[in-house]
Amino acid sequence: MEIGNVITVILAAIGVVVVLALTGRWGQRLPWWTLVIPAAVATGALAPIALGLPIGALLQALLQGSVRSGGEGNLTSWVFALVYGGFAVFGITLAVLFAGPPRQRWARVLTVTAFILFAGAMLFWAFVSEPMGLAGWKSIAQRAVLVVVALLSLLGCAALLPPGDRPGHRLRWTLGWIGCCTAAVQGPVMLLLANDAAINPVLLAVTLVATPGAAWLGHSAIHRTACAVSASNAR
C-alpha cells in the first residue's frame, strides 16, 4: 500500500501537468510524445476503474451489503468510494481534455495472440475461486474491473487490427485507444502493486507479451493514419 500510494502521488502530479499543458498555450509547443505517453498511461490505468468499478461496486453492494476493497488494504466503504471514485473522475476529465494498422499477417497473428492471452488471464482471475485467483483481488468490485480490462483489451485489438490506410470512425479510434492503452498499462500496474510484493509468474508472462504488443499496435495505427492524412492533404 505504501508503494502504491507513492506511485499514485507521482502519477497524479504528472496528470496535473498534462491538464495544464492541454489547457494552456505553452502545451501546444511541446513535442507530441510528452503528452501522448502520459495520456496513454492514464488511459490504461484509469479506464478499467472508471468503467468497471461502478458496475462492480453496485453488484457488491447488492450481494454483500458493503463496498469494502477486500485484500488491498481493506479500505472502508467511504474511503474506497472516495479514492477510486476520484480516479474515475480524473480519468474521465483527462479524456475530455485529450480529445494505419499493421498489414503483415504474422504481425497481426502475434498481436491477436498477445491480446487473447492477456484478456483470457484477466477473465480467468475474475471468475475463478479465491485460492486460484490473483492475490489481493478478492472482492466483486475488484473482479469486475478485471472483466472490464479483458473486454477493453479485446475491443481495442478488434478496432485497430483491420488493415487499411484511411482514418477510421471516431468510435473505432476511441475503442482502439482505450483498449490498447489498457492492455499496455494494466499488466505493469498490477505487477508494481502486486499483493505483498509477490509477483505472479502468469501475470508477468502475459504482461511481457501484451504490453509491447499493444504499444506496437497503437503506434502502428497512429503512424499509418498520420501518413494517410499527410498524403491526402498533399493532393
Image (tube, rainbow, N blue to C red):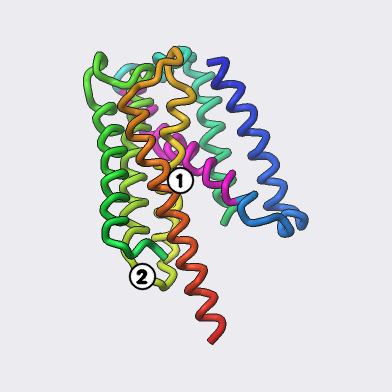
Callout 2: 10 Å neighbours few (<14), some, many (20+)?
A: some
Locate residue 82, reporting x and y percent: 55, 25
Q: Is residue 177 something one can see in this rendering?
A: yes
The magenta segment: 36-62
Figure check: 109 above or below 57 = below
Relative side of 60 to 75, left or right = left
At 31% from the left and 44% from the top, the residue drawn is 115
The answer to whether marks 2 and 1 mark residues whose Cβ atoms lie closer than 8 Å is: no
Residue marked by disc 2: 164
- SS of the residue under disc 2: loop
Name which quarter of the figure residue 133 lies in: top left
Locate residue 225, reporting x and y percent: 47, 68
At 64% from the left and 49% from the top, the residue drawn is 34
Specify whether residue 39 is painted magenta: yes
At 64% from the left and 39% from the top, the residue drawn is 15
Specify whether residue 177 is painted magenta: no
Residue 181 is tagged as: 1
Figure check: 87 above or below 235 = above
Along the line of sight, the residue nearer the viewer: 93 or 147: 147
Q: Amino acid at mark 2?
A: Gly
Q: Point out the tag, 2 or 1, that comes first from the N-terminus.
A: 2
At 35% from the left and 45% from the top, the residue drawn is 153
- SS of the residue under disc 1: helix
Q: Residue furthest right?
A: 26
Figure check: 185 above or below 84 = below
Q: Residue furthest bottom?
A: 235
Name which quarter of the figure residue 106 lies in: bottom left
Relative side of 196 to 135, left or right = right
